[in-house]
């Protein structure tokens, strides 16, 4: 039987070239559709975790709103995005009213539904804004390379040298040594992009950017682990062989993408 470790590498060998092709050659609309698909799958996995007792109709009700949020980023209009966020809250409130029972907690259900829309489609939608920049494709490659390198390094450094638990109550497998190894990989990959793709930026701001992206990426990983731990699940799903669910793969990007967007807009 194939080990999960081998599955991880085989999946990466297949998925990475396809991802590079899609980002590099697919165009803005194709990329937005891809982000929308990822947001929809991630949202379903999230609802399966936090709304496990609800019906499938209740879980799927947030999908149109999530896709509308992603579409608003593609339209590149802040007013449209804010309008969709307000609409999402109002629709979620109506859904909660329809599902409310004597033993139900409408505030908890409303909180989980709206949080899911902010947590996944809204945060992930920042990838579309980044893709629409000048050199947007290169910025997307930079972000994904930094995050994926950090994830991989944290995993292997933690396995080889990990002695001190980073957050044992949330994710017992993560270690301080792994986190440091992940940040080192963030720096290495980020420095290569700085040298060959973005020489116009100063090293001071660039180092700060890498620290912010790397740290928030690890925090995003811990937040998703916290969600899974709260419901006693190891993975968010099984759609990615060897990796678990899609949410397990994009959890760091959810926090890192907005960080890159606002850091570049306001500081670089």
Image (cartoon, rainbow, N blue to C red):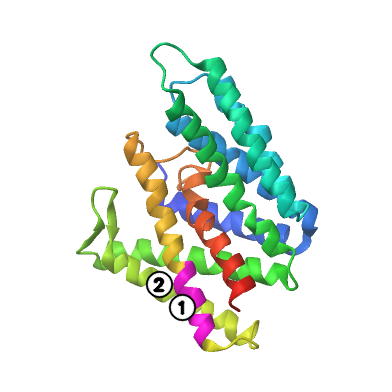
* In contact (CB < 8 Å): disc 2 and disc 1: yes
Q: Main secondary structure of the magenta part?
A: helix
Report the magenta residues as a range. Answer: 204-213
| Residue assigned mark 2 | 183
Q: Is residue 182 left or right of residue 97?
A: left
- For the residues labelled 2 and 1, the Cα–Cα distance comes to 6 Å
Q: Determine crowd level at label 2: few under 14, some 14-19, many 20+ residues with C-alpha closer than 10 A.
A: many
- Quadrant containing the C terminus is bottom right
Q: Which mark is residue 187?
A: 1
Report x, y in % for residue 64.
68, 33
Asked if residue 253 lies in the magenta stretch, the reply is: no
- Residue 145, given in percent of the width and then of the height, sits at 55, 68
Q: Residue at point 59% right, 39% down? A: 41
Nearest the viewer among 245 and 82 is: 82
In front here: 156 or 174?
Answer: 174
Give the image quarter of residue 23: bottom right
Mark identifier at residue 4: none
Left or right for 67, reference 225: right
Compared to residue 234, the image places residue 215 above or below, namely below
Give the percent coordinates (x, y) of residue 252.
48, 57
> Regarding mark 2 in the picture, which secondary structure is present there?
helix
Position in image of residue 180 (x %, y %): 33, 71
Residue 234 visible: no
Q: Quadrant of residue 178?
A: bottom left
Furthest toward the top, the residue is 102
Q: Is residue 108 left or right of residue 192?
A: left
């Amino acid at each position: 039987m194939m080990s999960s470790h081998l599955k991880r590498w085989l999946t990466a060998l297949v998925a990475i070239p396809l991802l590079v092709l899609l980002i590099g050659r697919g165009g803005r609309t194709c990329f937005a559709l891809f982000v929308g698909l990822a947001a929809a799958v991630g949202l379903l996995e999230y609802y399966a975790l936090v709304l496990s007792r609800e019906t499938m109709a209740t879980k799927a009700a947030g999908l149109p709103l999530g896709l509308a949020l992603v579409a608003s980023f593609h339209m590149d209009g802040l007013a449209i995005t804010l309008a969709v966020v307000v609409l999402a809250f109002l629709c979620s409130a109506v859904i909660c009213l329809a599902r409310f029972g004597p033993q139900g907690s409408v505030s908890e259900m409303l909180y989980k539904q709206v949080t899911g829309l902010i947590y996944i489609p809204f945060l992930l939608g920042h990838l579309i804004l980044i893709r629409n920049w000048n050199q947007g494709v290169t910025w997307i490659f930079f972000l994904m390379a930094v995050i994926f390198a950090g994830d991989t390094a944290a995993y292997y450094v933690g396995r080889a040298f990990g002695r001190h638990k980073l957050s044992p109550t949330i994710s017992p497998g993560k270690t301080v040594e792994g986190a440091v190894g992940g940040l080192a990989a963030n720096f290495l990959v980020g420095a290569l992009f700085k040298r060959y793709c973005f020489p116009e930026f100063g090293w001071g701001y660039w180092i700060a950017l890498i620290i912010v992206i790397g740290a928030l990426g690890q925090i995003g990983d811990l937040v998703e682990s916290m969600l899974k731990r709260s419901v006693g699940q190891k993975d968010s799903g099984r759609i990615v062989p060897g990796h678990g669910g899609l949410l397990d793969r994009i959890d760091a990007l959810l926090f890192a993408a907005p960080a890159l967007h606002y850091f570049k807009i306001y500081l670089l």
